[in-house]
Image: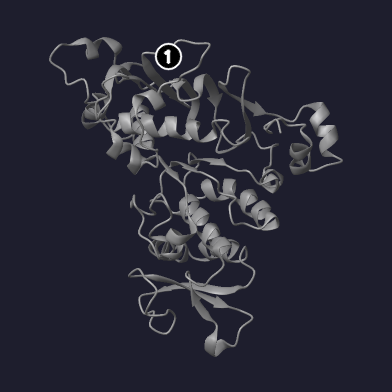
Amino acid sequence: MIREVTIRGFKSIYSATLELGRVNCFIGANGAGKSNLLEALGVLGAAANGVVDDESLLRRGVRAGLPRLYKSSFATDRTPAHIAIEVTGSGNEAYRVSLLNPLDSPEPAWSYKTEVLSDGNQEILSDGIRNKKNLNPKAGLAALQLVELDPQNPAAQLMQRLQEFAIYCPNTPTLRGIVPDQQSRLPLGVSGGLLAEGFASLREYLEGRGEEGEEILEQVLELIDWVADIQTTSYGTNLLSPKVPRTKLLLKFSDRFMNQSRNELTAYDASEGALYVILAAVLCLLPQAPRLLAIDNLDQALNPRLLVRLISRLAGWLQDNDCDRQLLLTVHNPAALDGLDLLDSEVRLFVVERNSNGQTCIRRLTLTPELTQLNQQYPLSRLWIMGHLGAVPNV
């Protein structure tokens, strides 16, 4: 599990260090820099895979941009020559990289200035190796070192997590299957594409686990109170208008309130909230999903009460088949906070704000005695709106 992240000189994050848990929720005003934090991990994931260019960034859900937009730019501070990002795991395994790209004549791929990989006991790749004249500065060396490492080596595990990392930013048309996902990957595209295929894999996986898996599947279905069952089908002639674009596989919802002869509908007609619930379940429960992932604006389209229940189940779902899985999520709906069990040390809430110089600052919010006393009167959602937690705009 990744425990510490350090970011320097990336967009609005001039310098920040934070310690992650299993579920990491980030709140803040619009423009505070929540997405920038996720994107910094996406840049590191691309670096761990051997190349940092628009293609590798877009595949991970990172917005493509020029160096002048990626490098911090503040009136009070000099623009840094490079971007530096580092992560450290539970066993002190670490990967650190600094990346260069000139502002005036930007190149398609970023150059590696330094690159360090350690398994916690010894350095596998050290700073000095990048100084050799015959190396391609745009190709990462750590990715090549993985060939020689035992797959169970902590450094290899760390690099694999980073390579898998993606920022999922679902939108309703893609979840409904009426527009293609621009960045398709397994088990789901970064915009929520392949949702039917993802759910089919999840259902098959859970049903294959017997009674325990059936109980987890029931946990997912009961979050959608109007649903009797969810299946997938490739036959949609009787369910969709011929004018509606469709994918090869369709989600098929059975509405428990409707006449049984006409109670089936597809993702095109179903509540969008149901689709976001399915997306979260697939990403948290399916073994093929990234072990380190982010969901931007998970709360969109969800009823506040449903959001509370969904958030409360994420930690349990994540550790269902791998105790080291991690999720980072951003939210704007205050109800999301009421689903977080902050007494669990692996469930963490982070406040993201910009200081007087405009730099993004990230701090973990813990329940102080004062907050605990207030929390006895008001839920966290109310305390956030009242301004007791910070993370609100000056409006």
Residue visible at 42% across and 14% down in the picture: 79
Residue visible at 58% across and 61% down in the picture: 273
233 shown above or below 77: below
Q: Residues within 10 Å of mark 1 (few under 14, many from 20)?
A: some
Residue visible at 48% across and 39% down in the picture: 324
In this rendered view, identify the residue nearer to me: 148 or 57.
57
305 shown above or below 92: below
Q: Quadrant of residue 85?
A: top left
Which color scheme is applied?
one colour
Q: Identify the secondary structure beneath mark 1.
A: loop
Q: Quadrant of residue 41?
A: top left
The residue positioned farthest toward the left in the image shown: 134
Residue 216 in the figure: left or right of residue 93: right
Q: Quadrant of the C terminus?
A: top right
Residue 61 in the figure: left or right of residue 26: left
| Residue 327 position within the rendered picture, expressed as x and y whole percent measured from the top left | 51, 41
Residue visible at 58% across and 45% down in the picture: 315
Question: Which residue is the site of mark 1?
Answer: 79
| Residue 331 position within the rendered picture, expressed as x and y whole percent measured from the top left | 60, 43
| Residue 123 position within the rendered picture, expressed as x and y whole percent measured from the top left | 32, 16
Residue type pointed to by label 1? Thr
